[in-house]
Every structure is written in structure tokens, then in C-alpha cells.
Amino acid sequence: PRPPGESHAFLALVPAHRGYAWFKKGETRKALEDFEKSIQLAPSQVTGYYNRAYAHMSLKAFDEAVTDFSRVIEIQPSHANAYINRGHSQMMQGNLERGLEDFIKATELDSGRVEAWMGCAGIRTEMATRDSKNREDLLEAAVADLKRAMASPTLSEGQRGAIEGLLREIRRLQGKIR
């Protein structure tokens, strides 16, 4: 028997894994129920919050995703994936500055994270379309972000293609201002 108040971290893995299986099958509502059970059993563990946040993202429930990713970061400040996914959620809500801050933090935690550099570049490019005063600087920063992503040893062919597409878009935008 466990002392009162002690986390049931090991027991929390059962609903967490079951929820993940539901999520993979496309049963997101059932997955959310199991992630909630996991959180109730071990509220100081990141697994339930992270998985629930990811499920919320898939449902486009970005407010809930941001809340859960923030909880993950509160518990484990070095969780680069939580920053990346919170950045995506922030971006989808139109909170570009906050999203950029999250992507930058992820690159500080792990400079090899292609997704984080791509997130930075994507947000800077979007900001450049809205801010004519700082457009050139934002686009130059986005190109620098993409160069860092291309230098990552974990770069996949799919990511390379996405980066090349974003670079073409940036070059197109830069041609409009010169």
C-alpha cells in the first residue's frame, strides 16, 4: 500500500498507454478520458498532460493544448517538445510572438531540433507579411533559422522539402520588397 498523497506514477502508465493506443486508432475522445485518468493518478508526471495536450491539438482545441503544454513545462522545464507544440498551438491561435518565444526556447534547449527552427522561420515569415517596417529583418532571420535547420544531423528528406518550399516563399517575398 502507498502512503496517502504519494503519486501512483507507475499505475498512471496503464491509462496513458491505453489512451495513446486509442489516439492512434483515431478515438480521440476515448484517449482524452484515459489521459485524464493518468493525470488523476499522477498529477506530477508529464505523460498524461503531454498526451492530453497533443490530443487537444488534433481536435484544434488550442486553448486546452496551451494549458496542458504549459503544465508540462512547469513540471519539466527542459521538455523541448512541449515548447515546440505549445509554439504550434500559440501560432494556430494567432499568438505569433508567444509562439516564436516557445520555438526559440526549444532551440535553446536543443539546437538540433529541426521543427523548432522551422517554427521560428514560419512565424517570422508570417510576421513579415504583416509588418512592412521590419519585413527585411524578419525574412533574413527566417532564412538564418532555416539554415540552422538544414545543418541539423536529424534533418529528414520531408523536412528538407518543406524547408526548400519555405525558402522559395521567402525569396518571393524578398523580391517584392527590393
Image (cartoon, rainbow, N blue to C red):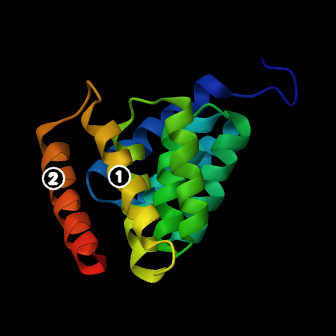
Compared to residue 38, the image places residue 54 above or below, namely below
Residue 170: x and y in percent read 26, 65
Observer-side mark, 1 or 2, equals 2
- Asked whether 91 or 19 is in front, the reply is 91
Q: Which residue is mark 2?
A: 164
- Secondary structure beneath label 2: helix
Residue 113: x and y in percent read 39, 35
Q: Is residue 176 visible?
A: yes
- Residue positioned 48% across, 40% down in the render: 81
- Asked whether 42 or 177 is in front, the reply is 177
Compared to residue 22, the image places residue 90 above or below, namely below
Mark 1 or mark 2: whose residue is earlier in sequence: 1
Q: Quadrant of residue 74?
A: top right
- Residue positioned 64% across, 43% down in the render: 72
- Asked whether 117 or 144 is in front, the reply is 144
Compared to residue 102, the image places residue 46 above or below, namely above
- Which image quarter holds the N terminus? top right
- Asked whether 135 or 46 is in front, the reply is 135
Indicate which disc residue 23 carries: 1
The residue carrying pointer 1 sits among few (fewer than 14), some (14 to 19) or many (20 or more) residues within 10 Å by Cα, namely many
Q: Is residue 9 left or right of residue 153?
A: right
Compared to residue 82, the image places residue 166 above or below, namely below
Q: Quadrant of residue 6?
A: top right
Residue 157: x and y in percent read 11, 39
Q: Residue furthest right?
A: 4
Amino acid type, mark 1: Phe
The residue carrying pointer 2 sits among few (fewer than 14), some (14 to 19) or many (20 or more) residues within 10 Å by Cα, namely some
Amino acid type, mark 2: Glu
